[in-house]
Amino acid sequence: MSRSMNKAILVGNLGADPEVRSTSNGSRVATLSIATSRQWKDKAGEKQEKTEWHRVVFWNTKFSTLADIAERYCKKGDKVYVEGSIEYRSWQDREGQTRYTTEINGRELILLSGKGDGAETFSAPSKVAAGAAAPKGKESFDDFPEALDAEDDDLPF
């Protein structure tokens, strides 16, 4: 059996504050517009630049609040890292015309425009074990004193 993969990774800037709305069943969804740019020199040596705009959606689920996180922490101009899958959708508008869109269904969000001590990572868990405990925050060597006691003579330095 052959496997396949649908994975998109974007690093870019937000073109606007996230648009957050609630669906008819009460789910919350945030839509982000992310710009990515590439630069090159043409044959004449002139610098050229092309910007692409990407639509990214983050959903609140039973296990994740990415839509709420995007609403609270993301602002126009922020640099973000987004990971997700590409999705193509079509629908009928009010005039009966078929409309099409391509979007990234976001599964991970890293804020790169760190206002504090660095970037923050938020992700939607891919699999959650029943009864699994939530992480208790950052661990440090103080939590594992025996890790510092062992001598490692195998180290090359």
Image (tube, rainbow, N blue to C red):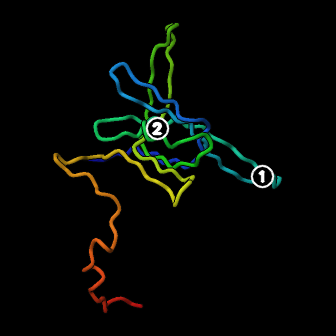
Residue 84, percent across and down? 42, 43
Residue 149, percent across and down? 27, 85
When asked about the image quadrant of residue 62, the answer is top left
What residue is shown at x 48% (from left), y 34% (from top)? 103
Indicate the amino acid at tag 2.
Ile
What residue is shown at x 39% (from left), y 43% (from top)? 107
Count residues near mark 2 (Cα–Cα under 10 Å), then give few for <14, some for 14-19, many for 20+.
many
Task: Name the foreground residue: 99 vs 111.
Answer: 111
When asked about the image quadrant of residue 29, the answer is top left
N-terminal of the pair, mark 2 or mark 1, is: 1
What residue is shown at x 32% (from left), y 35% (from top)? 61
What residue is shown at x 56% (from left), y 54% (from top)? 115
Q: How far apart are marks 2 and 1 (CA)?
A: 29 Å
Q: Mark 1 points at which residue?
A: 47
Residue 64, percent across and down? 34, 41
Mark sitting on residue 139: none
- Residue 41's place in the image compared with 21, above or below, is below
Q: In which quarter of the image is the C terminus?
A: bottom left
Task: Please tell me whether mark 1 sits on a helix, a strand or a loop.
Answer: strand
* Residue furthest to the left: 131
Q: Name the residue under label 2.
A: 104
Count residues near mark 1 (Cα–Cα under 10 Å), then give few for <14, some for 14-19, many for 20+.
few
- Residue 155's place in the image compared with 14, above or below, is below
